[in-house]
Image (tube, rainbow, N blue to C red):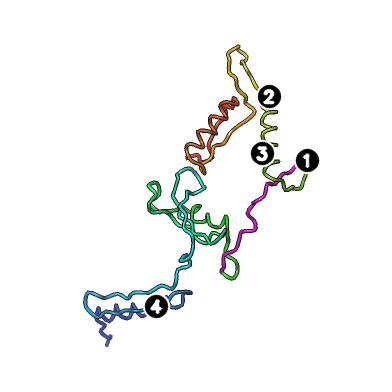
Amino acid sequence: MKPKISRRDFLKYLGLGTAGTAALLEGVNVTPAFASTPEDKLPTFELGPLKIKKAKETASVCAYCGCGCGLIIYSEGERVIHIEGDPDNPNSDGAMCCKGMALGDANTIVNAKRKRELNRQRAIDVLYRAPGSSKWEKKDWDWALTEIAKRVKKTRDETFEEKDENGITVNRTQAICHIGSASIDNEENYIMHKLMRSLGVINLDHHARL
């Protein structure tokens, strides 16, 4: 003869099983509140202290593609401890794609002890490899920006065309290409685009490719 279990008992046993499973999770304090009235049928749980309780909250934009998805970044000092979608952002409504979900790993990673530490593989210095060399050299930003400006000018001077083969004025260089950025705002992109046009750059593209 099969034992008879009422709907109320079934929910109670289900709550006990769920509570036992949740108790195995680290940092979770389980406080089951079983049905005391017909309307109160499911258990409730009380979470432990949030890891972002004392963190600084900063609104930002995802660095990938060009959708402009909003992020909320939680940090302690210079260490990012958590990133989540911004529900107030009109582009994403708090959602994050697989790239956005992994964005926090660009700053910190979870080690074998399940603690976040700085990602040692993240490049934070200017690295320069001379032509024909197999080694990277650390350079400062002043040297890098000056070197970039010198090379852009040299390339432009050597390849600038005032007129094409038909004698039509073109004022262009086809030896330089500019790839736009989805990690900056419209005004900054406008200034970059204006700079490239003033140099005669006509090969303009964008890395988002949406």
Say which element carries label 2. helix
Give the position of the N terminus as an image quadrant.
Answer: bottom left
- CB atoms at circles 3 and 2 under 8 Å apart? no
For the residues labelled 2 and 1, say whether their Cβ atoms are less than 8 Å apart: no
Q: Residue 117 lies in magenta, yes or no? A: yes
* Residue annotated with mark 4: 30
Query: Foreground mark, 4 or 3?
Result: 3
Question: Is disc 3 surrounded by few (<14), some (14 to 19) or many (20+) residues within 10 Å?
Answer: few
Tag 2 and tag 4, C-beta contact below 8 Å: no
Q: Which residue is mark 2?
A: 157
Graded by Cα atoms within 10 Å as few (under 14), some (14 to 19) or many (20 or more), the crowding at tag 2 reads: few
Looking at marks 3 and 2 on the same chain, the residue that comes earlier in the sequence is marked by: 3
Looking at the image, is mark 2 or mark 1 earlier in the sequence? 1
- Extent of the magenta region: 115-129
Q: Amino acid at mark 1?
A: Gly
Residue sitting nearer the eye, 77 or 61: 77
Question: On the image, numbered disc 3 is attached to which residue?
Answer: 145
Residue drawn at (76%, 39%), measured in percent from left and top? 131
Which residue type carries mark 4?
Val
Where residue 94 appears, as percent x and y from the top left, is: 40, 54
Instruction: Kindly state the secondary structure of the residue where label 4 is placed.
Output: loop
Q: Which residue is mark 1?
A: 132
Structural distance between the alpha carbons of marks 2 and 1: 24 Å
Q: Is 122 contained in the magenta span?
A: yes
Compared with 132, 4 (above or below) is below
Q: Residue furthest top?
A: 167
Question: Tag 3 or tag 1, which sits nearer the N-term?
Answer: 1
Label the magenta part by its dominant secondary structure.
loop
Kindly identify the residue that appears in the image at 38 percent across and 74 percent down.
46
Between tags 3 and 2, which lies in front?
3
Residue 155 falls left or right of residue 21? right
